[in-house]
Amino acid sequence: MISIGFRSLVRREILRFVRRPKNTFMPPAITNVLYFAVFGVILGGRIDEPVAGIGYILFLVPGLIVLGTISNAFENASFSIFHGRWNEYIHETLTSPLSYVEMVVAYVAASAVRGLIVGVIIAIVGRLFVPISIENGLFLVATMVVIAALFAGLGIIGGLVARDFDDLTVMNQFILRPLVFFGAVFYSLTMLDPVWQYVSLLNPMVYMVDSVRYGLLGYSDLLEVAPAAYAEFAPYASLSILTVLTVAVVALDVYLFKIGYGLTD
Amino acid sequence: MPPAIETVDLVKEYGELRALQGLSLTVEEGEFFGLLGPNGAGKTTFINTLVGLVRKSGGEARVFGHDVESDYQQARDAIGLAPQEFNVDRFFPIKEVLMHKAGYHGIPDDEAAERADEVLKRVGIYDKRNERFDWLSGGMKRRLLLARALVTDPDLLILDEPTAGVDVQLRHDLWDLVTELNEEGTTILLTTHYIEEAERLCDRVAIMNEGRKVTVATPDELKTRGTDTVSVRLESTPATAGGLNGDLGAYAEAVSTAGDRLEVRVDDGGATAPQLLNDLEAAGHEIVDLEISRTSLEEIFVDLTEREDRSVTRSGTGDGDLEPGDDESIGDGESPARGDSHTEDEATQEGIAQ
């Protein structure tokens, strides 16, 4: 049973970013036009051989969707929580009769929605540059929902831990973005030396990008480079692990709300 | 029916500092209850414990019988809080802010919109309903905090210094409104620095100091605890009062002279004045006029809290004592960083909003 209180908080959170498209949707749209134009058309045009058998612009699409989705889900949750703490209006939520689970799930759901909307925007931008047909639609949707929720959940932790706005910038620019860039967004793992292939497998972003690429294009790097025991089940194994991770992160969010970490004195 | 508020041995510690030191207090349903105390007394910490913004270190706290931690949803649903700080959502017009708050309390959209209009009219800022919080004047902001507390139709309304820094007109408007609400059955907990406000509005008041309850009484009872001053002008007032002590009975707690007047402090000025006049005439003094002044609640408040300070110092409970200068920020449970945030946050509001 979804309570009125829960719906109210979800709506408040969604309205906050929907009414500010210049701050929330325009930047990723413009950034991705640049990515596709510069990396896809100008540089990609000089790459004669297809990457993993796929044209370079099309190869870029899943990674850029992941990059935009998780950045925005994380940014939305962390900003909303931190800004509410900074101006203390999060007290409106904290002093309400919502349960801690409802509070957390509402913040996660709204932030995941923002991430997913940005993902769709990037897909539309990509479609302007290259034809796209979805290979595994259900798998793609499931993966997108999971990774958006995962980074919304991580964003809540970021918003609770941050002490000023600079901390949010550090998390997004210096931790999240490098991991995604080295997560096989712009290249295939098959192009790397074996040593770097194994190092890359330690980067959790690889599994997200790979799963979305599998859902969208039907191609998975992990099927090629992961150890045989994992490759046999990839990318379904990736989705399963990401789902468990998401549930764990949301449970941690609920615990932090319950003990009032960063929220109460 | 359980009390509106019931705390037993409530303790809140911030490291070495104890902002609440075993506070036991009961506020009955329907009461207008005042909480008085100097800065750092623990008033805001007490309130924030009830609404879930401060986690207690020990003791019990219940709102209408609901434990504030194990039954937090029921306890919070019963409370409407108008805090000292302007902690309002700045992204939305104020009517929507109120609708959101009502929604969190389970009130459906249509009804939330109606209630928002109603409370905005009630506090007199309905014509500003489409403005955002930052564009309101200071007085309007204060009114909005009250409207937000009222939009959920709470059984317990908590007002944390609602008239601090507001003009006389607004203060009287707020007094009228909260009196009306109390008459309609809402239990009200008011913290204030204005003694006149407590005297005028409250059925009972608790005086707090350094996290402790000093006393609980009606304003009238409190006033009887003070001494009255009977000021008598004599035809020939002696230069010093020393010679008069023997002429007056044991009722005179202190005798002094001020200009051409003799001032005698007694427990009950009205009852004692005839005896005093008789004694002075019997001692050969000719009386010109007489005035009786009662001790104000403010003087009693200062006297009680100072007496408490002295007893705390004497009893040597060093752990619980707040250091000079710490009381504002720590006693009220506010971190300095937050207290300083308003200027900067307003500056960053538009630029950083993501």
Image (cartoon, coloured by chain):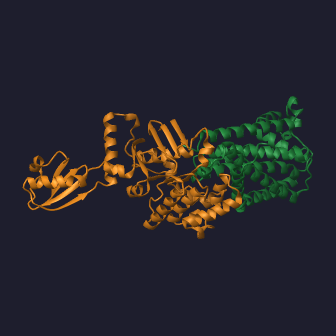
Chain colours: A green, B orange
> Horizontal placement of B277 versus A132: left or right?
left
Snapshot quadrant of residue A127: bottom right
> Horizontal placement of B324 versus B350: left or right?
left
* Residue A79 position within the rendered picture, expressed as x and y whole percent measured from the top left: 65, 51
* Residue at x 63% of width, y 57% of height: B352
- Judging depth in this view, the residue of A72 and B278 nearest the camera is B278
Q: Is residue A44 above or below residue A262?
A: below
Is residue A207 in sight in this rendering?
Answer: yes
* Residue B349 position within the rendered picture, expressed as x and y whole percent measured from the top left: 60, 59
> Horizontal placement of A144 versus B79: left or right?
right
* Residue at x 91% of width, y 56% of height: A131
Q: Residue most toward the left?
A: B284
- Judging depth in this view, the residue of B274 and B147 nearest the camera is B274
Q: Is residue A246 above or below residue B32?
A: above
Numbered label tally? 0
Q: Is residue B143 above or below residue A204?
A: below
* Residue A87 position within the rendered picture, expressed as x and y whole percent measured from the top left: 57, 54
Q: Residue most toward the top?
A: A229
* Residue B69 position within the rendered picture, expressed as x and y whole percent measured from the top left: 59, 39
Is residue A187 in sight in this rendering?
Answer: no
